[in-house]
Image (cartoon, rainbow, N blue to C red):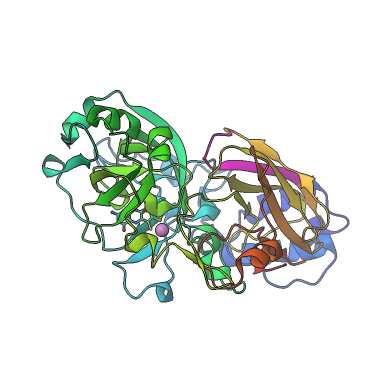
Amino acid sequence: MSKIIKGPSTRELMEQMVRESEHLSINDRRDFLRKGVAAAAGMAATTIAGSSIAGEINKANLPPNEPAWGKQLGHGVVEHPYGSPSQFENHVVRRTVPWLTADSIASISMTPLQDLKGIITPNGLVFERYHGGVPQVKPDEHRLIIHGLVERPIIFTMEDLMRFPSVSEIKFIECPANGGMEWKGAQMEALQFTHGMLSCCEWTGVPLRVLLEEAGVKPEGKWILAEGADGAHMSRSIPIEKALDDTLVVYAQNGEMLRPEQGYPLRLLNPGWEGNTSVKWLRRLEVGDKPWYHREETSKYTDLMPDGRARKFTFVQETNSVITSPCPENPLVKPGFLEIEGIAWSGRGKIKQVDVSFDGGVNWVPAKLKGLVLDKALTRFSLVTKWEGQPWLLQSRAIDETGYVQPTLGQLRKVRGGNSIYHKNSIHTWKVAPTGEVTNVQIT
Ligand SMILES: Nc1nc2c(c(=O)[nH]1)N[C@H]1C(S)=C(S)[C@@H](COP(=O)(O)O)O[C@H]1N2
Ligand SMILES: [Mo]
């Protein structure tokens, strides 16, 4: 072992090391990689957090042997009529911060962004936010009512709604409280908790415009109240311009009917806007001539400004980005070539550019946008670089197609002061130590 970690680090050397480490148990492997990093980068070994390798390694399953699972038959076709992830991926779950809410009924769980690939959030990992728990809505007994300033008030069944031609669109949903625990300082040592109130799915349903045409909005109809069927009766006022633009009434996510947590059987989807406007378990749309000023748009989801006034109707989720690898849950384990990856999103449109800084925002390098770059969807960025154990202050900065540049924390605090909970979209910093360990820090 020691013979291969002598001398300067090269890609081949490190790859060989990792190959060799696969023969070791989890603890040995950590130790091995730690020593390898230290030796190759010429520095003292300390800690490397985290590992996704499950259990002890049984050498009998490694080459040149035939692994046990190749010597017998597997399970049959209907053993799991609805599939689930491999048992070895059971660490990839939604998590909550217990002190954040008083109970689990009016609470929030967060998406494990650190474990996801591409831009789609699998249905079982979409963050959940409810103000009154998840109701068990019977689809046959669920109705959507459109009334108020309309020519023809209508009550739709689910069947009625599904007869309209459908559209499918990939859009993110973000709670404006995302990052809210970090306004006064860095405190969450996990990407899942700094940015996990965020998910991105392919949503299927009917444009709200089409349903409003059926009802015939009267000329004085300028706002829509959307109300949920849950015990919280979550309700938000939506301007008619948005309703006629890209708002959807959706019944499916990522190819299957909505999950109960996401509003089964019907939800509103306001692309790029505060998650709370995407009312779940949608039962009522009332057309009016002014906003309703309900609880969730007065006492909540407003931002107290430094001068004591509150911002209202801050619908748009501003341009934001974060590096997902490395991050506290994904430390660097070996020197050499490395793909820095992250996600960027904007409630104002498409992401145009993402830059990465290694020195806390002094110098910036453009990253590559990879895969689909869609309107109001997560966009994945990537930058291939080399790490030789030097400390980094890693940041990403997104720019959207409207030219909006993600602000620094200092710029944001200057405008918004320190009383806010919502809409913290500032540039985020991960501190990478020579050990490869990644911590959450703030630079203004
Ligand atoms: N009816 C209803 N709709 C609701 C909520 C709710 O409690 N009840 N929570 C809102 C909030 S605050 C957010 S952030 C989003 C979260 O959507 P998700 O749970 O599908 O991720 O749903 C919104 N829609
Ligand atoms: Mo939210």
Residue 148 falls left or right of residue 189: left
Residue at 31% over, 67% down: 106
Magenta span includes 371: no
Viewer-proximal residue among 379 and 164:
164
Residue 221 falls left or right of residue 241: left
The residue positioned farthest toward the top in the image shown: 165
Magenta span includes 375: yes
Residue at 54% over, 40% down: 118
Quadrant where the image shows the C terminus? bottom right
Residue 308 falls left or right of residue 281: right
The residue positioned farthest toward the right in the image shown: 7
Ligand 2 is located in which of the four quadrants?
Answer: bottom left
Q: Position of residue 138 (x, y in %)?
A: 14, 46
Viewer-proximal residue among 142 and 6:
142
Range of residues picked out in magenta: 373-384
Q: Indicate the quadrant where residue 399 lies.
A: top right
Say whether residue 185 is visible.
yes
Q: Position of residue 171 (x, y in %)?
A: 46, 40
